[in-house]
Each structure stands twice: as C-alpha cells, then as structure tokens.
Image (cartoon, helix red, strand yellow):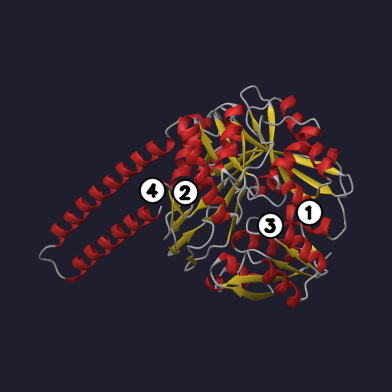
Amino acid sequence: MFDNVLIANRGEIAVRIIRTCKLLGVKTVAVYSDVDAEALHVKLADRALRIGSADPGDSYLNIDKLVQAAAEAGVDALHPGYGFVSENWNLAEKCRQAGIKFVGPKARTLVIAGNKVDCKRIAKGAGIPVIEGGGSVFYTLEGALDAAREIGYPVLLKAAFGGGGRGIREASDDRQLVQAFRLATTEMKRSLGKTGLFVEKLVKPARHIEVQIVSDGRGKVIHLGERECSIQRRHQKLLEITPAPGLDELARMRVAEHAVTLAKALGYENVGTVEFLMDADQNFYFIEVNSRLQVEHPITEMRAGVDLVKEQLEIAAGEGIDYGQDDVELKGAAIQCRINAEDPTAGFAPSSGKVERLFFPGGAGVRIDTALYPGYIVPEYYDSLLAKLVVRGADLEDARRRMSLALSEFEIEGPKTTIPLQRFILAHEGFARWNLSVEFLQENRILEAFSEQAAVERADLATKGAVIAAVLLESGAGHSGPRRQEHRSAQRRMSQKERHYDAL
C-alpha cells in the first residue's frame, strides 16, 4: 500500500478519500484554492498545499499545478476523485512520467473511454446493443443537421468528451437542433474546456441504469450490481437507487454481463461505471463509461459491504482483487439523495453563503458524506453538491421510508437546498410505486406541484406568524419588562422559523 497520497479534489469526495486513507494508515495531502483555505478536507488532511485562486482553471483544473504539488509533497500516488480532471488522460500520463501512481485507469484507457464515439464502436463490436447514430463527432452545425435528418427526429445531442449530464440536449426538428447545438457547445466550452458533439436517436420512454465494475486490469472483472439513476433534472441526477426497481432477473443479469464484457474489451483497470438506457421492454443500450469513482458509489458500498476507495487504492498499488463474482453478496436496498445548494423553485439557481445552522439525521442504516460544518461558507465557484444522504433498508420500500425520515430530520440553515424537493419526490405516489423514467419530473409535473405547495406553506407560515405576534403584542400591552421580553423572544423564534423555511 502507498505511504502518502495526494487528493486532487475538494469537498465531500476529498473528505471521503481522506477517511479511507486514514483507515489504511496512509498519509494524505490536500490541495486547495484561495476560497477553500478553511474547507474540511484541508483540516482533515495531514498536509495541505495551496494551488491557486478560486478559478478552477487556476487550481483544481490545472494539471501542471496538481502534478507539481504531488512532486513537491513527495507522494506515492494521486487520487483524482470525481469531476474536475478525474478522467483526464493527460493527468494520468504526467503522473506516470513523474513516477506517481494515478489512482484510476491508465492514460490509454482514459483516451478511449473519454471518446464516447470510439467507446460505442468498441461496445458494438463486443456485441453490446447501442443506440442508432453516434458514429461521428461534429464540430459544426451542418454536420449535426445532416446526421439528425438521416437518423430521423427526435434525436439527442451529446457531448463526445466528458460527462456529468453536460452538453446534452433534445431536438425534435431542425429549428430545435440549431438552438440545442449552440447551447450545448457553449456549455461544453465552459465546463469541459472542449467541444464536439454526436447525434443519436432519442429513446423515450427510457430509464437510466448503470453497473458498478471493479477490474484488476489483468482480465479479472467483477460487477457489484446495478443502480437506477432515472430521477434527473436537465440530465443531472437528483437521487439514485439500488437495486433498480422492477427489473426481471434475466434483465438484471444481462445488463451486468454487458458491463463486464465491455470492461474486458477495453482492458479496463480500477473502478468504473458502465451506463445504459433501458427502454419500456427492458432492452439495454450502452451510453458511456465513467472511468472514475461515481458520485453515487455509496449506495453500492451499502449493499455490497465494500469500500470502493479502498478497492481503488489496492488495485493501483498492484494488490489486485482477492475475491470473485460468486463471493459478491448484495443485501437489501439503498437510496442516495444529492443535497445540492440550489433553489428548486427558481430553476435550480445556485445558492451560496454561510451555513448558519446544521443538523444531520441519524439512525440505523443512515450515512452522510459531506464537507459541511456550522460556519462554513459555501463558495459560488464550484459544483453545488453539499452532501450525499444515503440510507440502506431491508428492501426498496424500507429504504424509501428511511430516506423520507432522514430528509425530514436534515436541516441546513443558510444556502437554499434541494432537501424539500427530495422529500416531495419520495412521497409522490408515482415514486412510491417505482414508476420511474428519465422524464419522471416532467411527466408528473413535480416541479410545478412542488412550487405550488411551497408557496401555500410559505403563506400559511406567514399568516400564523402574524396572528401569534398580534396576540402576544396585545397580551403584553401595559405589562412590565418580563412580558415584553417574552413577546420579543416569541418574535425572534418566529423570525428564525421563517428564515429556516427560506433556507430550505
């Protein structure tokens, strides 16, 4: 095992990696930007190095600075986490040249997996179903228009490089495709630093199913079951579930076999995820490979009883996998909610600011991955993820109930969060019946219904506050200090409740 590891990331995933390293007796080096000097990952690491300004391009996206920091610290390995440069082949190659082990796939694998068109070609050659289209990368609108007309609308525009739901747009005709191409290209430049789109047939209705794989790079590949990631907004996941509800056993086995087959065809090494779309007849179509640790990896850990970061480090250190597929035992069900600093009633507008008050839920089967603490100032420069709330239950319904309870206890006063929306989704009849699809929010008018309910609750709270304040004021008239103090205290409590509701 390594002696010293640099974590080239921030936030909850940096904290997550540091904790596993501590359990393994591995020292850690954190990196931070100017606005992250007081971040939790900086406080928990054995050593921390400043690498730049708040601008990600000057810090967490700057490969040269990351490798320089790793060399300065004299580490054995670099763990990229997820996001930022976690799937960047150039980082992996520069680490190799510097004699630093990159905790993830080799550079050549990242090149192939990072090109969705090439990856689809390999999948198709391995006998794995793929969606029609997606055979070429387009940098100009004209090429995309020709491809869409040949495939036939509706189509999906997707980023050829990168992931995380960015650069994805639907189009039902030429006019929509023109607009979608421009928007997707702009988004890709901003978030991925490069452009290039491909066009494929839109599968609708569809569910988003992915499979967790672990590979030693020497031909041994195992899977740790599938995850349902269909609850999304603008192709960004809100919550994830395992196992995927309603799959027959044949379909469950088939999608796992597809994932293992592709990993072997790629010569994949380390931990990764193979993503699929599933149609109404439970047919699977390969989407992409995420050659890194997934945001939603904790729900697989909860069911499989493994530490995927530990698996990553051991494989990178050459220790391999000491168990086989028959040894994997998946127990119960698990759900994860991504708690984001966003306002769902305002188009998921980002929210930042100081965490004034924080209360975490607890109980059996509850896990929270976060870098939050009271007084922490959520910066505006990075991804909005604040915490991952994960629960495990005996079955899907038990997990759903436990998650509903945990969400009701979770309090963050300060930035607005997605917690109230996730509570609303968990209680929705369609979700409780597991009638899921990537269009779940739109088909059930979730955002409209949630906003209407929030407006009513806000009005009720304001009315009750006014009535209570008026009664206390009247009863306190003509009385001395203690009664007036009681009135002022009641007003403060009411004001705190209103601020708390605003924060949620």
Can you tell which mark lies on residue 105? 1
Task: Say which label, 3 or 2, has the lower sequence index.
Answer: 3
- State the image quarter where residue 9 is shown: bottom right
Task: Please say if the residues under marks 3 and 1 sit with CB atoms less than 8 Å apart.
Answer: no
- The mark that comes first in sequence, 2 or 1, is 1
Q: Amino acid at mark 3?
A: Ser
Q: In the figure, 17 relative to 349: above or below?
A: below
Q: CA distance from mark 2 to mark 1?
A: 35 Å
x, y percent for residue 457:
32, 44
Q: Which residue is mark 3?
A: 86
Which numbered disc, 3 or 2, marks the residue closer to the eye?
A: 3
Task: Give me the C-alpha separation between circle 1 and circle 4.
Answer: 39 Å
Residue 200 position in % (x across, y down): 62, 33
| Label disc, if present, on residue 140 of the rendered structure | none
Which of marks 2 and 4 precedes in the sequence? 4
Q: Which residue is mark 4?
A: 346
Give how far apart the Cα atoms at labels 3 and 2 are.
Answer: 28 Å
Q: Which residue in the protein does label 2 denote?
A: 419
Residue 497 shown left or right of residue 290 in the figure: left
Residue 269, percent across and down?
Answer: 82, 50
Q: Quadrant of residue 120?
A: top right
For mark 4, give the secondary structure: helix
Q: CA distance from mark 4 to mark 2?
A: 14 Å
Residue at left offset 58%, top offset 32%: 148
Foreground: 486 or 460?
460
Q: Secondary structure at mark 3?
A: loop
